[in-house]
Image (cartoon, helix red, strand yellow):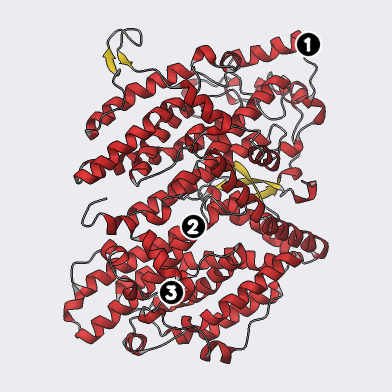
Amino acid sequence: MQSAALPTAESDARFIQLVRLADDHLILGHRLSEWCGHAPMLEEDLAMPNIALDLLGQARALYSHAGIIENKDRDEDALAYRRLEREYTNLLMCERPNGDFAHTMLRQLFFSVFMKHYWLSGESSSDPVVAALASKAQKESDYHVRHCAQWVIRLGDGTDESAARLAKALQALTPYLHELFESDSVTQTNGDVGFLPEPSTMQTRWRADIDTIFDLAKLCLPSVENLLTQGKSGGRQGLHSESMGFLLAELQFLQRTYPNMQW
Amino acid sequence: MSTSSVTPLWEVFIRPRNGLAHRHCGSLHAADAQMALQAARDVYTRRGEGQSIWVVPSSNIVASDPSASAAFFDPADDKIYRHPTFYDIPDDVGHM
Amino acid sequence: MYSQGLNESNLASAETPEFLAEFQARIDADEKIEPNDPMPQAYRQTLIRQIGQHAHSEIVGMLPEANWLTRAPTLRRKTALLAKVQDEGGHGLYLYSAAETLGISREQMTEELLAGKAKYSSIFNYPTLSWADMGAIGWLVDGAAIMNQVPLCRCSYGPYARAMVRICKEESFHQRQGYELMISLCNGTTAQKDMAQDSLNRWWWPSLMMFGPSDSDSLHSDQSRLWKIKRFTNDELRQKFVDATVKQAQHLGLEIPDPQLAWNENKNDGAGGYDFGEIDWDEFWRVVKGHGPLNRERIAARTKAWEEGAWVREAALAYAEKQKSANTDPNNLAQKVS
């Protein structure tokens, strides 16, 4: 395994960032799956699980690769299910309860636009496994953007009620945007060696896409400066919202109640 | 419920792979064409069934009347001279 | 499926004895009936009722399994379960579409469901209490559904038959994923095996009830069979299910909760089959009539989704309306055919 040849700090950084990404995808996919059977229309009962399945698939690939790099015999489920809350390092945005359809779609749009550009850059990763994963995930994110943008535009330019709900969702989600672009020593190390791009470098492209969509949705995003400097933080350090404990209580229920069993 | 809140019905046609014709595979509800296309993708191509999708508002389908089917279709039944087997060609001429 | 192209005059075919005989002759000749064809009003109503019930069963049937989506124990199981519940939504959608060709809208059918006027398979009124229930549902409930559905692929009504072909193709993974899940539990610890047995105990009888009332009490069977909407009787299908399932339970090392279950070599015209105990028909009718463990909760969940989704559907329609009146962009036309 290639991790053996890497200096510890570098392999640690790789592991940490892969788990961050995996956690984002697992937690958001988990949230999205809560809609299944309860969507506003039957067509959307098919569409949202499609996105959730893509996210969960990406999470699995990311955990598996992280486990290999870590080299401590932890597989996808050990990482996904058997860690303490403080060890989950997803974006706080992902763990937010779903709220209404406007909140769910707007959050997904914010995340997917980011991931689309992130995976596009990730296609040239120095790690061939990551490059392959990015190339597959990039196409999936592209579709997620199309689907969510379609809805955000229709909610924004639909009825007074839908526009008001979307505006409310924007207000609720704005403080969480900053965390998407956060950088620290982990992202810097990985950026420097070409393992994965620095999240902060996605800002301009993300902003341009969101502006185009918001234009059609008749929505307005706060200025770039505010997004960068203000907002909630802590997810990457495992400092979560109060809702995370309940999410994990469900996610980990069987693994915790019946430890060390095959399912 | 008022009729205005009924989401229109669409017919979905899928081309399984390039080289084949689009084929009717079902219908769905969507408010507009773009949503119908995406819904068709999410509903009808989950197992890699398609390379291309057409959606058509169901109300735009003009169908022949089954009660006229005798008049429409039966007259073609006895025009056997339109089929190659109607003509006798000696075997030794070979395939034609 | 062309419902909006229905020729109104055909809806009220004059049902002379000649017309009915002609229709029956088409059925007897194994001709398929298609949406615009003249058909007896009772045939149309029977289909609307049956396809509607079938669609509702798929939709309500998403709920008991969705209950465990957030608690699935591994990522593999989680994705499989999500894909399965999603499929059920798809199957509901195909079936609503098939019913819509008969001149009823999905919205109408949904309202009938929510108002308690339309029935759905009563098995979905039972609660899912453990992870093993995900296995038992896939194995037993989908297994029973397949017994019912395979013959429907040859149903006389074209759109229903076509929907069923698609559904059966997709469902083939459902029962396997359920049974595989049961295998994992039965090969696991005592706690897991107990979970599996408890689940079988709770789902066995409701699964047998899925085939409907006994032939002697069934309201619709005879006419439906004459019209080739239905190809086997409830009791025939139930027997087939028991015969197929007992072996599968033995393989798992689980015990079917029926002391009267016994091999009878004279059954099935001498091919052999299982005798089994009497179904608790009081319970069956109680659940059918709305007094099962979760009838109210299931309908409440569907009502909530429908009502809370109204503003979303309205927004999409309002946007479409605005676009229609403003749509002068020739680029939009170019996108339409590609």
Task: Tell me the SS state at disc 3.
Answer: helix
Instruction: Give whichever of C184, B63 is nearer the camera.
Output: C184
Q: Can you say whether C167 is above or below C85 in the image?
A: above
Q: Can you say whether C325 is above or below C18 in the image?
A: below
Chain ID of residue with mark 2: A
Residue A219 occupies quadrant? bottom right
Give, as a three-letter code, the residue at label 1.
Thr
- Which residue is pictured at 37% across the width and 44% down the height? C134
Residue annotated with mark 3 = A119
Mark 3 crowdedness (10 Å alpha carbons): few <14, some 14-19, many ≥20 = many
- Which residue is pictured at 62% across the width and 39% down the height? C96
Give, as a three-letter code, the residue at label 2.
Glu
Task: Tell me the SS state at disc 1.
Answer: loop
Q: Please say whether residue A227 is visible from this viewpoint.
A: yes
Mark 2 or 1: in front is 2
Q: CA distance from mark 2 to mark 1?
A: 53 Å
Q: CA distance from mark 3 to mark 2?
A: 26 Å
What is the x, y in percent for residue C112? Answer: 67, 37
- Which residue is pictured at 54% across the width and 82% down the height? A175
Chain ID of residue with mark 3: A
Label drawn at residue A34: 2
Are discs 3 and 2 located on one and the same chain? yes
Chain ID of residue with mark 1: C
Who comes first in sequence, dot 3 or dot 2?
2
Task: Tell me the SS state at disc 2.
Answer: loop
Q: Can you say whether A138 is above or below C15 in the image?
A: below
Instruction: Give whichever of A144, C110 is nearer the camera.
Output: C110
Instruction: Give whichever of C1, B13 is nearer the camera.
Output: C1
Label drawn at residue C16: 1
What is the x, y in percent for residue A10? Answer: 25, 85
Is A88 displayed left or right of C117 in the figure? left
